[in-house]
Image (tube, rainbow, N blue to C red):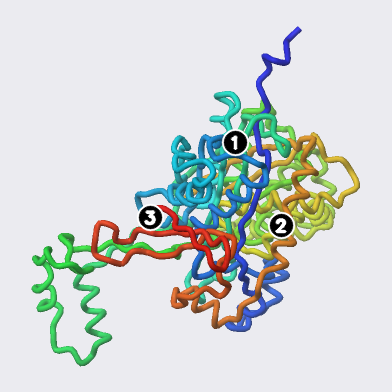
Amino acid sequence: MISNQNLPALVGIDDIAASIPKLMLPIEDLAKARNLEYAKLNKGLGLEAMSISDAHEDVATLAANAILSLLLRNGLQPQQIGRIYMGTESAVDGAKPTASYVLDMLTQYFEKDYGKDCLLNCDVVDMTFACIGAVDALQNTLDWVRAGRDRIGIVVGSDIAKYELGSGGEYTQGAGAVALLIRENPRLMAIPDNFGVATRSVHDFFKPLRTVSKAQLIEEVLKLAKESTLTTEEILSRVDDKLEEEGVLNSQDALITLHKDTPVFDGPYSNLCYRNRIWEALQNLAAKSGLNDNEPITDDWYRLIFHLPYAFQARRMFSEVFMIESKRRGDWNELQTELKLERPMRNHFETDAEYEKAYNGFLRAISKTARYRKFVAEKIEKGERASSLVGNLYTSSILLSLMSTLELALNEDRDLTDTTFGFFSYGSGSKSKVFTGILQDGWREISQRFNLFEQLSQRTAIDYETYEQLHRKQKQLSVIAPNGEFYLADICKERSVLEGARTYKWKESADKLVDAKR
C-alpha cells in the first residue's frame, strides 16, 4: 500500500485576480468614428467595448494592482512569495524587467509592516513570446512549485494592446492584467504536468526594432520646416562628432533604433498560424498522453479556454479541429449531411491561394452548422463574454477567458468539481501550448470572489476625442484620478544616469501619497 505522504502533491491555480482600467470606449463609438459597420464588429467579431488605460496607468501598475489584490484577499505576507513571473509584450524597458518595477511597488506598500527587505528574496522576471508569455510563466512556475515543498509563486500577465489609429487591428485593442496564485493543493484548479507544444518561426505579428538614419530624420524635419535653409549634410556635420553634447542625434551610430508600441501584422496569416499551431500542439499533447491517432482528444473536456485576440476568434478558428475530432469520433457523415459540402482537395486547384480560399470557406460553413453552434454554446461561449467587454489583453487574454467561464459557471445547476478544462494558448511568432486543468473542491468559493463582471460594469465610458488623446499620449492628466491603487508618477527626462527611470506611487487617499522606490 502506498502512503498518501509519498504521493506527489497537486499543483495549480489557487486564486485569480484581475486589474482592468476604469475607462472603456464603446465599439459602436469607434465604428462611427471610422465609418465602419458596427454590426460586423459586434455580431461578426463579438466586440462591445475595449478597456482603455488612463494617463497614470501602464503594464507595471496594472500588474502590481492585480497582485496586491491577490495577496490581500488571501492574507499572504510578502515573505511567503518566492517568485513573481510576468508575461508581457508591453515591457516598459529594454533591459530592466517590468516585474522589477512591480516588485518595488509591492515593497513600498508592505514595507511599513514587514520591512524594506520583505521581498528581497523574491525572484522576478519577464517572459516574452507575444501573447503566450503568461502561459510560459505559468508552466515554469508550476514546475518550480512541484520541485519543492510549500512554495508559493505568482504569475501575472499584463499588457496594453495598442494598434495604429485606423488600422485593421484598432478595434481589437484592450488593456489589463490578470494574476494567478500558484501553490500546492490548489483550491481552484489543479494542472497536470503535461503540455503539448508547437513552435515555428514566422512573422505573423511582431514589433521589430526599426532603424532610421540620422539623415532620414533630418530630411523629415527639413521637409516639415519648409523655411529652413540648412541642408541635411550641414546639420549632420554639426552633430556627428560632438558626442560631448546631449541630444537624440548625438550618437556614435549612423542608424538610430526606434521601438513602437504598435505591431507589424498580417491578420489572415496570423489566423492561419493560430489555427495550425493549436492543432499541432493538441496532437503533441495527445501523443504525450498515449492516445492513438484515431481517438478524439477533446471529448471529455468540459470547457475550452482560448487566447482571444478578439472575442469570437476561437469559434472561428476551431472548426478544423472540430471536423477532425468528428471524423475520429465516427459521426462525420451526420455532420456532412447537415453541411451538404465536400471538403476541397488541393489537386483540384491551380494555386495554393485558390485552395486556401476554398478550404477557409469550407471551414466557415462548418462553423455555421447547428451542431457546431451547439458545441460553441456549450464549451466556448462563456469564455468570450469578458473579452467582448474588454478587448485583447495579449498575455492575459486566456486567463481572462478562464475567469469569465468560471464566474458564469456559478449559475449552472451542477457541481463541476473534477471536470476537465482544455486550454489553447497562442503567441505570434509563433507558438501554441495546449494543456488541461481539473476543477477542485473550492472552485465555487474562489470564483464567487472574482466579481469580474461587476468590475466591468462600473467602468466609465469615454468619448472618441478622449480616446484619441490617450492613444496619442497627448493627455497628461488622468481622466479618473488614481484612488487606492498604484500609479505612474513620473518618467525622468533629465539628461543623467536616471534618464528614463520610472517612479511609481501608491495613492492611499486624496491627501496621502507614498513614494515608491525606483
Q: Is residue 102 above or below residue 289?
A: below
* In the foreground, 193 or 463: 463
Q: Residues within 10 Å of mark 1 (few under 14, many from 20)?
A: many
* In the foreground, 400 or 98: 98
Label 1 – label 3 distance at C-alpha:
31 Å
Task: Name the amino acid, label 1.
Answer: Gly
Q: Is residue 445 above or below residue 56?
A: above
Q: Which residue does the image show at 33% across and 64% down from the upper left? A: 492
Q: Is 420 displayed left or right of 169 in the figure? A: right
* In the foreground, 250 or 373: 250
Q: Is 48 displayed left or right of 66 in the figure? A: right
Image label count: 3
Identity of the residue furthest to the bottom in this view: 227
N-terminal label among 1 and 2: 1
The residue that label 3 is drawn on is: 93
Q: Which secondary structure lies at badge 3? A: loop
N-terminal label among 3 and 2: 3
Q: Which residue does the image show at 71% across and 57% down from the upper left? A: 452
Q: Position of residue 192 (x, y in %)?
A: 66, 31
Q: Is residue 445 above or below residue 255?
A: above
Q: Which residue does the image show at 73% across and 15% down from the upper left? A: 4
The residue that label 2 is drawn on is: 452
Task: Name the amino acid, label 2.
Answer: Leu
The residue that label 1 is drawn on is: 196
Q: Which secondary structure lies at badge 2? A: helix
Q: Position of residue 334 (x, y in %)?
A: 85, 48
